Amino acid sequence: MRLLPPGLGPAVGTIVPHPAATAGRPGGPPGPPRPCPPWLAARVESVRAEMVAGVLGVEVAEGDVVAAGQTLLLLESMKMEIPVVPEGPGRVVRVAVGPGDVVQEGDLLVVLEPAGGAAQAPGAAGR
């Protein structure tokens, strides 16, 4: 932990943990990206941010089945609202952002399993 000089933090003399100490913990900065297992990478589609934007709202949850063109989430950039839509039908495997988040170009937004795909580990069938 480090002590911030007076006037340079949330409150004078507040002890603030270093970002590396809280990486990946709830309320802390995100940790390093987790690699996608090869068996899953071949079966899913990552939806990524095309520009720096704020997340206004998330319209889907993990497990939802979505249609081509259905709004997954709504971004805001330069006072424009930008709906994020899938190119084809599928199932939401992961939602990586929430309302109020700020995303950078290339950040992961949503992971989709295309319709007809099966995103489960090899040997996991029948469990």
Image (cartoon, rainbow, N blue to C red):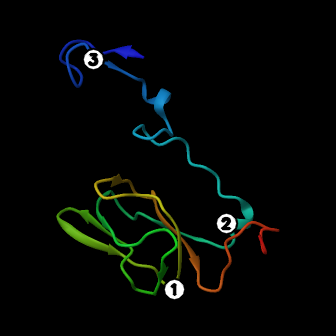
If the image is split into quadrants, where does the N terminus sit?
top left
Q: Residue drawn 74% across and 66% down?
A: 121
Q: Of the two numbered discs 3 and 1 on the same chain, state the one appearing first in sequence.
A: 3
In the displayed structure image, the side of residue 43 where residue 114 appears, left or right: left
In the displayed structure image, the side of residue 106 where residue 84 appears, left or right: left
In the image, residue 6 sits, relative to residue 40, either above or below, namely above
In the image, residue 19 sits, relative to residue 89, either above or below, namely above
Q: Which amino acid does label 1 sit on?
A: Pro
Q: Position of residue 73 (x, y in %)?
A: 35, 70
Residue at numbered disc 2: 41
In the displayed structure image, the side of residue 90 where residue 54 appears, left or right: left
Residue at numbered disc 3: 14
Residue at numbered disc 1: 89
Q: Residue drawn 28% across and 54% down?
A: 100
In the image, residue 1 sits, relative to residue 95, either above or below, namely above
The quadrant in which residue 70 appears is bottom left
Q: Where is residue 27 in the image (x, y as percent from the top left)?
A: 39, 39
Q: Position of residue 77 (x, y in %)?
A: 24, 62
Measure the C-alpha gap from mark 3 to mark 1: 49 Å
Binning the other alpha carbons within 10 Å of mark 1 as few (below 14), some (14 to 19) or many (20 upward) gives some
| Residue reaching furthest to the right | 123
Q: Where is residue 45 in the image (x, y as percent from the top left)?
A: 57, 72
If the image is split into quadrants, where does the C terminus sit?
bottom right
In the image, residue 71 sits, relative to residue 99, either above or below, namely below
Task: State yes or no: discs 3 and 2 in contact (Cβ < 8 Å).
Answer: no
Q: Nearer the viewer, mark 1 or mark 2?
A: 1
Element at label 2:
helix
